[in-house]
Image (tube, rainbow, N blue to C red):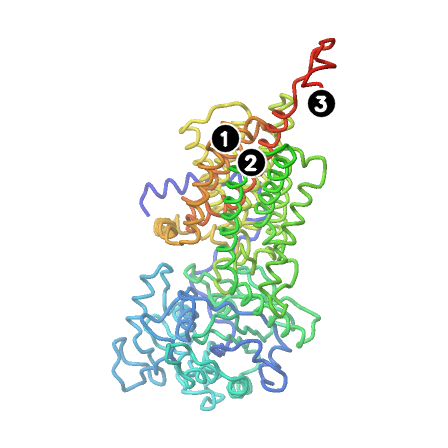
C-alpha cells in the first residue's frame, strides 16, 4: 500500500474510534493476535460425496450416513462456486482455497487421476507415497486471475506450516488436500485400500466417494447435450454404494477424529442444496450454522475450509473467506431433521423456478397498469360519478401495484413451496398480501388523503424489511425479491433488491410523515422526524448485525440529508450533495473498521482489511464493472426505460386539464416533491455504488412510480370535484332562489 493510502487508513481509523465507542460490544469479540504459526492439535477427515442430497439419506438405504446424522450436526450445503453448476473438481478446489474456485475450461467430469511417484509432473516429482494433482500449475494460475483471486493449495499449505501432513484417498481428494505445489503427503486410491496406519498417519485426511456422481457419468447425456436423469432405483443404488464406502472410512478412524461429510458438487442437471454433516466432540445431535449464513440448518462450501482449520487448530488466513460450522442443538428426531433439510431444498428449487419470471411479471403488470392509467386519463369524461369511478379504480390498481414488492416478502410467512403446484399458490399469496396492504391503505378516513394511503404501504414495507433483518433475515432467504441459497450471493442482511426497496420505502415514509408538521409550520419537528427515521434506516441497513450493506449506506446518507434540507426549506447544491456522500463514505468505512476487529468479520470488515493491505481497488473496480454489465439485464433495463417514459409522458406531462399528475400532487401535498426527488436520488446513487447496477433503480421505480401515480390520481380527483362544485351565491341575491344555478342545486 502507498504511504498516502496508509495515511488515509490511519485517518479513517481515528474517525472510526468514535463509532467504536458506540458499537463497543461489536469490538468486544475481537480475536487476540494469533501467532504466525500454530501446531496442529486436532484430527479431521473430510468425506466428499459429490451430488449427495438429503433425499438420498434414509435409515434403510444409507445406514452409515444416517448414523452420522443421528449422532452429529446436519445442514443443507450451498455448493455454488464460480458457475451455476458446481462440478466435483470445482468443489474440491474450493475446499483447497477456502474461496470459490474452478477447474478451468473443464467439463463436469470426474476428477483427473493424480500423478504418482515415478511419473513426470510439471509441478515436480510426487513425494514417496504421495501424489500430485494433475494440471496443477494451470489450475492455480487460472484461479489466481479470477474475480475471487483464489489461492489454490491454501489448506494444504497451512497444515504443512503448522507441522502436519495430508492424506488423500481418491483422485478428487488430492485437489482438496494438496498444498501450493499440488502435493499430498500420502495417497490411497480408494477407501477399501486404506489401512489403520493410513488413517492415523496425518491429522488431515480427505476422502473422495464418487459413486453417486459416477452414476450420472455412466448415464451420459441426451442428443441435446443435457444430462440424462437417473431413475429413483439407480440413484438409490448409487447412494447405497457410497454409503458402504463411508462406513469403511468411519470404521477405520482413530478415536477423537472429527468427521465432516460434504456433498460438495452438483451433477450437471440443476443446482441443489447438498448434504453437510459433522460428527465429533464439538458436534452433537442438531443442526449446523455458521457466521457466513446466520441461518440454522444452512452452511456453505467455503465454510468447510474454515471448519477444518479450526478443528485442526490451524490459523485461518484472510484468503479463506468462510466461517467455521457451529452446532445448534435440537431435540428434533433424526427423521424430523432430515425432513426439514429436504424441505429447505424444495423451497430453494421452487423459488429458483419462479424468481426470474416474477420480475418479468411484476414489471409487465406495472406496464399494463401504466397503460390503463393512460387510457383512463384520455377517456376521462362524462358525469362526476363516472369520472370518480375511473379515477378511483385506477388509483386502487396503482396502490395494489405499489404493495406487490412488499407483499413478495410477506409471502415467505407461508410455506407455499409445499403445495402440489407451488407457482400458482405463490402468485395468489403475493396478490393476497398486496390486497391486504391496499385494503388497509384505503380502510380508514385517511383514504381521502393524497399521500397517506401510499404512506401506509411504504411504512409497512419498510417496517417488515427492517424487522426481518433485525431478527435473522428469514424472509429474505428464498424470496422473490430476496436471495437464494443456490446463488449464494448473500444469506443474511440486505441483498441489493431488498436494500433498494427498503431505502425507497423509508425515504417516502419519512417524507410523507412530515406532511402534518409542515402544514402547521413546524419545520423543526419535520426535520427531527427525518433525522430519526434516517438514523434508524442507516443503522438497519449498514450495521453488520442487521443489514450489513456497504453500498446502501453510501446512498441512504446523502438521500436523507437532502430530504432534511428540503423539509427545512433549505437549498441543495452540488457541493452539499458531495459532502453528504463523503459523510456516508466516512460512516461506512468506520463501520467496516470496527467490524474488521471482530473474530468473524463480514464483507464490510474484509473490505477494510483489503483497504489496509492495498487491495481495495480491485474490489471497487470489480463492482464497478459489474454495475456496467448490469445494463445487459434486459428485464430490468426495459422496465427502467418504461418507468422513465411513463414518469415523463404521463405523470409529468400536462393532461387535458393543463396540469400534470405530479404537479397536481405537488399542489395538494407539501412533501410530494421532496419525496420524489429523494427517492430518485437514493435509486440513482444506489445504482452507481452497487454491483447490481440498474437492478437497484428498477426496483426503486417498482415501488415509487405506482404510489406517485396513485397520489396524482387522487389530486386530479379532488380538482375535478372542486371544478364540479358551484361557487357559493351571495346571501340575499335574487339568484339565491331563482334562476338556472338554483334550479341545478335543487
Is residue 36 rendered to the left or right of residue 543? left
Residue 509, percent across and down? 60, 37
* Residue 318 occupies quadrant: bottom left
Residue 597 visible: no
Near mark 3 (Cα within 10 A), the count class, few <14, some 14-19 or many ≥20, is: few
Contact, CB < 8 Å: mark 3 with mark 1? Answer: no
Near mark 1 (Cα within 10 A), the count class, few <14, some 14-19 or many ≥20, is: few
Residue 316, percent across and down? 46, 63
Is residue 332 rendered to the left or right of residue 65? right
Q: Residue at x 67, y 49 (%)?
A: 436
Which badge, 1 or 2, comes first in the chain's sequence? 2
Q: Secondary structure at mark 1?
A: loop
Q: Quadrant of the C terminus?
A: top right
Residue 347 visible: yes
Which badge, 3 or 1, comes first in the chain's sequence? 1
Residue 544, percent across and down? 54, 50
> Could you say which is closer to the camera, residue 716 or residue 82?
716
Q: Residue at x 31, y 82 (%)?
A: 115
Contact, CB < 8 Å: mark 1 with mark 2? Answer: yes
* Residue 452 occupies quadrant: top right
> Could you say which is closer to the camera, residue 112 or residue 136?
112
Near mark 2 (Cα within 10 A), the count class, few <14, some 14-19 or many ≥20, is: some
Residue 427, percent across and down? 59, 58
Q: Which residue is mark 3?
A: 745
Image disc number at residue 380: 2
Q: Secondary structure at mark 3?
A: helix
Between disc 3 and disc 2, the foreground one is 3
Is residue 222 rendered to the left or right of residue 567? left
> Could you say which is closer to the camera, residue 309 or residue 683?
683
Q: Which residue is mark 1?
A: 656
Amino acid at each position: 500500500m502507498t504511504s498516502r493510502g496508509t495515511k488515509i487508513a490511519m485517518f479513517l481509523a481515528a474517525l472510526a474510534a468514535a463509532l467504536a465507542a458506540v458499537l463497543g460490544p461489536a469490538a468486544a469479540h475481537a480475536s487476540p493476535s494469533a501467532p504466525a504459526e500454530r501446531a496442529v492439535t486436532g484430527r479431521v477427515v473430510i468425506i466428499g460425496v459429490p451430488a449427495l442430497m438429503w433425499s438420498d439419506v434414509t435409515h434403510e438405504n444409507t445406514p452409515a450416513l444416517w448414523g452420522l446424522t443421528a449422532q452429529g450436526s446436519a445442514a443443507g450445503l450451498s455448493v455454488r462456486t464460480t458457475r451455476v453448476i458446481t462440478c466435483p473438481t470445482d468443489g474440491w478446489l474450493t475446499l483447497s482455497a477456502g474461496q470459490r474456485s474452478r477447474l478451468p475450461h473443464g467439463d463436469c467430469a470426474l476428477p483427473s487421476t493424480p500423478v504418482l511417484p515415478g511419473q513426470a509432473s510439471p509441478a515436480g516429482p510426487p513425494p514417496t507415497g504421495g501424489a500430485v494433482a494433475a494440471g496443477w500449475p494451470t489450475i492455480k494460475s487460472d484461479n489466481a486471475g479470477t474475480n475471487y483471486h483464489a489461492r489454490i493449495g491454501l489448506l494444504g499449505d497451512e497444515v504443512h506450516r503448522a507441522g502436519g501432513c495430508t492424506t488423500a484417498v481418491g483422485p478428487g481428494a488430492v485437489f482438496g488436500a494438496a498444498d501450493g505445489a499440488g502435493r499430498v503427503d500420502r495417497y490411497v486410491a480408494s477407501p477399501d485400500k486404506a489401512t489403520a496406519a493410513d488413517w492415523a498417519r496425518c491429522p488431515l485426511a480427505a476422502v473422495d466417494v464418487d459413486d453417486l456422481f459416477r452414476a450420472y457419468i455412466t448415464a451420459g447425456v441426451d442428443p441435446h447435450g443435457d444430462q440424462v436423469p437417473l431413475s429413483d432405483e439407480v440413484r438409490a443404488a448409487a447412494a447405497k454404494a457410497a454409503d458402504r464406502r463411508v462406513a469403511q472410512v468411519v470404521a477405520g478412524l482413530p478415536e477423537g477424529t472429527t468427521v465432516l461429510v460434504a456433498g460438495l458438487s452438483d451433477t450437471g442437471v440443476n443446482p441443489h442444496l447438498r448434504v453437510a454433516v459433522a460428527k465429533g466432540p464439538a458436534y452433537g445431535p442438531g443442526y449446523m450454522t455458521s457466521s457466513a449464513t446466520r441461518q440454522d440448518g444452512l452452511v456453505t462450501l467455503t465454510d468447510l475450509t474454515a471448519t477444518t482449520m479450526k478443528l485442526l487448530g490451524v490459523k485461518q488466513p484472510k484468503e479463506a473467506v468462510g466461517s467455521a460450522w457451529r452446532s445448534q442443538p435440537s431435540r428434533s428426531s433424526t427423521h424430523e431433521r432430515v425432513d426439514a433439510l429436504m424441505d429447505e431444498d424444495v423451497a430453494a428449487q421452487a423459488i429458483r423456478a419462479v424468481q426470474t419470471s416474477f420480475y418479468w411479471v411484476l414489471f409487465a403488470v406495472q406496464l399494463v397498469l401504466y397503460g390503463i392509467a393512460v387510457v383512463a386519463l384520455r377517456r376521462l369524461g362524462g358525469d362526476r360519478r363516472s369520472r370518480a369511478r375511473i379515477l378511483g379504480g385506477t388509483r386502487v390498481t396503482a396502490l395494489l401495484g405499489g404493495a406487490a414488492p412488499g407483499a413478495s416478502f410477506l409471502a415467505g410467512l407461508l410455506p407455499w413451496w409445499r403445495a402440489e403446484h407451488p407457482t400458482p399458490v405463490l402468485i395468489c399469496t403475493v396478490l393476497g398480501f398486496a390486497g391486504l396492504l391496499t385494503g388497509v391503505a384505503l380502510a380508514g378516513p385517511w383514504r381521502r388523503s393524497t399521500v397517506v394511503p401510499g404512506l401506509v404501504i411504504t411504512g409497512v414495507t419498510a417496517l417488515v424489511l427492517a424487522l426481518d433483518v433485525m431478527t435473522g433475515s428469514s424472509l429474505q432467504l428464498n424470496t422473490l425479491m430476496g436471495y437464494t441459497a443456490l446463488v449464494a450471493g448473500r444469506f443474511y442482511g440486505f441483498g441489493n433488491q431488498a436494500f433498494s426497496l427498503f431505502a425507497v420505502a423509508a425515504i417516502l415514509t419519512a417524507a410523507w410523515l412530515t406532511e402534518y408538521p409542515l402544514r402547521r409550520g413546524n419545520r423543526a419537528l419535520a426535520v427531527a422526524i427525518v433525522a430519526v427515521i434516517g438514523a434508524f434506516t442507516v443503522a438497519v441497513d449498514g450495521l453488520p448485525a442487521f443489514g450489513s450493506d456497504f453500498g446502501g449506506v453510501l446512498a441512504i446518507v446523502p438521500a436523507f440529508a437532502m430530504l432534511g434540507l428540503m423539509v427545512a426549506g433549505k437549498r441543495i447544491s452540488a457541493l452539499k450533495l458531495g459532502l453528504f456522500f463523503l459523510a456516508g463514505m466516512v460512516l461506512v468505512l468506520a463501520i467496516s473498521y470496527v467490524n474488521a476487529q471482530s473474530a468473524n468479520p463480514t464483507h464490510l470488515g474484509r473490505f477494510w482489511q483489503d483497504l489496509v493491505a492495498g487491495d481495495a481497488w480491485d474490489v471497487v473496480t470489480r463492482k464497478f464493472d459489474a454495475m456496467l454489465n448490469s445494463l445487459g439485464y434486459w428485464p430490468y433495463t426495459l422496465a427502467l426505460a418504461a418507468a422513465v417514459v411513463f414518469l415523463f409522458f404521463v405523470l409529468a406531462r400536462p393532461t387535458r386539464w393543463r396540469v400534470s399528475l405530479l404537479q397536481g400532487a405537488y399542489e395538494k401535498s407539501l412533501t410530494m416533491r421532496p419525496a420524489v426527488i429523494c427517492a430518485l436520488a437514493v435509486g440513482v446513487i444506489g445504482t452507481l455504488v452497487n454491483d447490481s447496477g440498474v437492478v437497484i433503480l428498477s426496483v426503486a421505480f417498482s415501488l415509487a412510480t405506482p404510489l406517485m401515480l396513485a397520489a396524482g390520481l387522487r389530486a386530479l380527483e379532488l380538482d375535478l370535484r372542486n371544478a364540479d362544485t358551484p361557487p357559493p351565491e351571495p346571501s340575499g341575491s335574487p339568484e339565491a332562489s331563482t334562476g338556472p344555478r338554483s334550479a341545478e342545486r335543487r
